[in-house]
Image (cartoon, grey):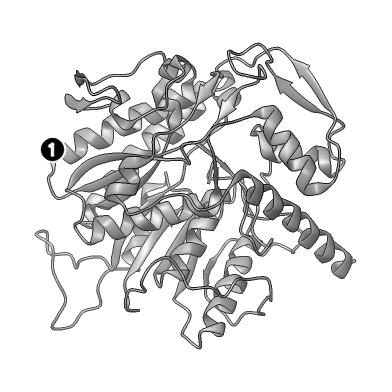
Amino acid sequence: MEPYSNSGSPSQDYLASSPPSELDTPSTALSSFIDDGDHLFDLPPLDGHFILVVGGLGYIGSHTSLELLKAGYNIVIVDNLSNSYRSVFERLETLAGQYYQLRCQRLPLMKFHEADYRDKAVMKSILDEYVELPNEHSRELDDGHRASRIDGVIHFAAYKSIQESIQQPLKYYANNVAGLVELCSVLSCYDIKTLIFSSSATVYGSIANSGVPLREEYCVHQPTSFVDCDGNAKTVLPGCTGLTNPYGRTKWMCEAILADLALSDLEWTIVALRYFNPVGCDESGILGEDPRGTPTNLMPIVVRVLTGLSPVLHVFGTDYSTPDGTAIRDFIHVTDLARGHVAALVAASDNRIKRGFRTYNLGSGKGNSVLEVVATMESASGTKIPIHTVKRREGDVGICVAVPTKAERELDWKTEKSIESSCLDICNALKVAKLETIHLG
């Protein structure tokens, strides 16, 4: 949800929206745009238990919802549609339905509630629907309430524009920080204490400008000792260094809150996934990135130029200490990122990682400059992208690249897709969107 998230639709919301409601999985018209290869994860048994995905219709949320369904999980999506579309749920049904039809298997349950995750009363009413049904096997909590059938939560419900956070900081602190506190309070009432949190590489602040790849120990919430890449033993204290914008501060604050929560209550297992730069879309072309508002991330802006919605791509800053002068980022395919969430959930559920609070970088470990990404998209699309260089944006850093080895070691996860495949998948999504427009026209 990145304002509850970026939309997962590759084109404008061309489907007529229905009034706010709860949606269960209906029969679905199946699409042919889907791979039929084996999935990364073994399927857990289908039962009456669910994973709650807060912000599950946004860009990253929708792709994660799809990967959860492919991995055999029943899902409950909560999204207020502030920056996503109801039609994304229908697209998820189509893709998941095709995936399971090819395997002659039953589609997991999908449920959608249009709601603001900050509304405590509404969230409690939703969670009340997923308590264990009364029978001889029902488990009761200490307060006499029945236990929840929601086994874990993946939380995407954060505003995420750096520039908007500078202009409207209170909006970001209210939603990202205060909202998280209320959510955790509600989850505690139902004894739901497995949480995968959508964090960000922005928590590293000005350390990113040091030019060294970023490892989790560079931003910690408890005293931490480690051996650096040169073999030197180091101990770092809790805190942050040179956070450059309110958005980054909200993510750091949220991590600190979650670390404190896990320390105070040892039943919590909380995993904070520090994203680098998600790009691309599902290879079917049916899910993509199309925020309701004006995009601020590089790739959706490039797409706007490719499709004629914007005349030129503004490149912010050509005087960074990088080979071509433009900023370097660690771009990660959104499907790899989504699978990282599933890997974290599996590791937490299987007790392969310790209870408490843990952080993981989700990145490729490789950096590409803005101009390199533009050249790659030009090659994939066969179209020249006009650019105009302007001064740096406030709050941006020059280089931000992950050291992802901790996730590979502890979560059994690593990226599989490249920046080239990301660009090809985006071009495919544009073709699919064009065909849909022609069909509806």
- Above or below residue 133? Residue 140 is above
Q: Is residue 35 left or right of residue 72?
A: right
What residue occupies the far bottom of the structure in this picture? 104
| In-front residue for pair 192/104 | 104
- SS of the residue under disc 1: helix
Q: Position of residue 335 (x, y in %)?
A: 53, 55
Q: Is residue 258 left or right of residue 19?
A: left
Q: Which residue type does callout 1 highlight?
A: Ser
- Above or below residue 161? Residue 388 is above
| Quadrant of the drawing holding the C terminus | bottom right
Residue drawn at point x = 13 percent, y = 83 percent: 136
Residue drawn at point x = 58 percent, y = 50 percent: 59
- Dot 1 alpha-carbon crowd within 10 angstroms: few under 14, some 14 to 19, many 20 or more: few
Residue ID for mark 1: 264
Q: Position of residue 362 (x, y in %)?
A: 42, 42
Q: Is residue 299 left or right of residue 194?
A: right
Q: Position of residue 322 (x, y in %)?
A: 59, 18
Q: Position of residue 191 (x, y in %)?
A: 20, 56
Q: Quadrant of residue 277?
A: top right
Residue 32 in sight in this render: yes
